[in-house]
Structure formats: structure tokens, C-alpha cells
Amino acid sequence: MKILLVADVHSRPLVKKHSLERTLVGLKNAIDKANADLIVFLGDIVHGPDFQKSTEPYEKYLRKVLDLTGKTPFATVFGNHDDECNISKDEILSIISSYPNSLTKGRNYVLDVMDEKLLFIDSGSYYDGDESYYDIVDEATVEWALGEIKGTNAILFQHIIVPDIMTICDEKPYFVPFWAYGDKKAVRFKKGIKYIGRMREHPCPPRIMTTELKRLSPYLKGMCFGHDHLNDFELELNGTRIIQCPGAGYCCYDNHFRSSVKLLDTQTMQTKIIYY
């Protein structure tokens, strides 16, 4: 099975017109080129903060992206920016479900497609407390997911990467590049960690360690994430393939870099990056 992984499109009106046009044209070409069995949007399809007055413009910019899928089945998870406006997640899900090729079932759900068990988790937005900036996947969600995939070899899709990624990273003070947005430390994988791809920005998981990876990894062959637009690394963590997907749009801080998506072969768990 071939799955096209699309992260962080950030469809929005408050950018230069050509930025969104370039994104939509590039994404359409990538979808046509990939000829995938399924498209998975890994959150932040729309840049919610740009839509504070009414829901109608939001729907327009969401449909600009979803219309590109044509007849190819697609599924979605929420990012931290999708609902940062006056439209609720339920309203967004209603728009998504209006597409005949949408397989999205809710915030957390499981699909069985072409002999593959696919797990979709809403990793939340912002944590209610000082311990972390970004939200966590709580124990109730982990317990639910465990009941859904136990005894299988599933693939998980969510927006924000698991906090375990920081256990294999070194943070060292150094000159802050322009894309670091105030981060005072660079991050590199620890010596001896084998990976492919690049880490161009500090990963932004929650600062609270969760049990998600530890408890689910025995029943997962892969975990796919978005959120950190400049990173496209892949590696093995706790016996599970970690696939970090780069930003698919030119409408955010990644506009100085070539946007791209990844085509995942679920039999080999190898990916091919498609630039545009």
C-alpha cells in the first residue's frame, strides 16, 4: 500500500498570494505524481489564527486543499493550529466528512485499509499548565489506542512527535539560525544514533514524558508525524520506525525551503520524498 503523507500545509489568506498558489499547485502535482492509495494529512491543513471573524472563509481555505485529493481516499488528524479560531473541531470534521472520498471518522479512530491497521490520534494543541507548552496524548487515549491495535502491526499518524525523541538528542548552546524562532539551543542526535534525513530545527514535543511510545510500540511498525516543518529525519526508536514529515506548504516559516511530501510504502516502511 502507498500512503502520501502531507503535513502542515497551513492554507491561509494572510500571506502573499503567490505563496498559497505555489503550495496548491505543487501539492496537486505531487498528488498526481504519487498515485497513492491513500492520502494522510498530518495536521495544520489550515492556519487557524488567520480566521477569527467567521467560519465561511475558513471552509473556503480548507476546501482549497481537500479539493486537490480528487477521488483518492484521504484521512486526517488535527494539528495544534487547525482550530485556533472560532470554528470548532466538530465543525471542521463536518466539512471533512462532506467529501465522498474522506475516511476520517473523528478525532481518534482506526481504519483497516488494504490489510493495514491505521491508527489516527489527535495529539492536541496546548497544555493546560506550566509543565509543558504543547499538549500530551493522555493515558485515556493511550489505553483506548492499545485496545484498538493490540496484537497487530499498525501504523500511527499524529501531528506532534512523541517526547521520547528528546531522549536521543543532545542540546548545545550555539549560534541561533534565523529559523529557530528564539530557541537558545541547537539539537543534534546523540553520537551513534543511526538516522536518515535532516534535523533543521529543534523538535517541539510536549515537555512531559508520556507512555504512548512505550505502551504502543510493541504493536506498531511505524509512527508518522508533522509539526516540525524543517525536519524530515527517519530512525528506529523503541523498535518502531519514526517518520518525521516536513512542511508541505510555503505559507509559514518554512517558506525559504523547498516544500515536500513523503510517499510511504507500508510493506517496506520506506519513504520517497517528493519536492515541489
Image: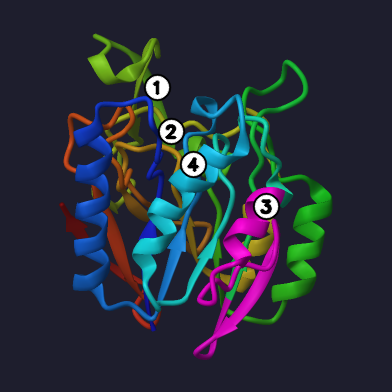
Q: Which residue is mark 4?
A: 165
Instruction: Give left or right: position of 273 versus 133.
Output: left
Question: How far apart in space, not on screen, are marks 1 and 2 (Cα)?
Answer: 11 Å
Q: Amino acid at mark 4?
A: Ile
Total labels: the figure holds: 4
Quick check: 262 above or below 229?
below
Q: Which residues are magenta?
A: 91-117
In the foreground, 23 or 167: 23
* Residue lying at 55% horizontally and 53% vertically, measured from the top left: 158
- Marked residue nearer the N-terminal end (3 or 1): 1
- Which quadrant of the structure image shows residue 199? top left
- Marked residue nearer the N-terminal end (4 or 1): 4
Label 4 environment density (alpha carbons within 10 Å; few <14, some 14–19, many ≥20): some
In the foreground, 202 or 276: 276
Mark 4 or mark 2, which is nearer to you? Answer: 2
- Tell me if residue 2 is in the magenta stretch: no
- Marked residue nearer the N-terminal end (2 or 3): 2
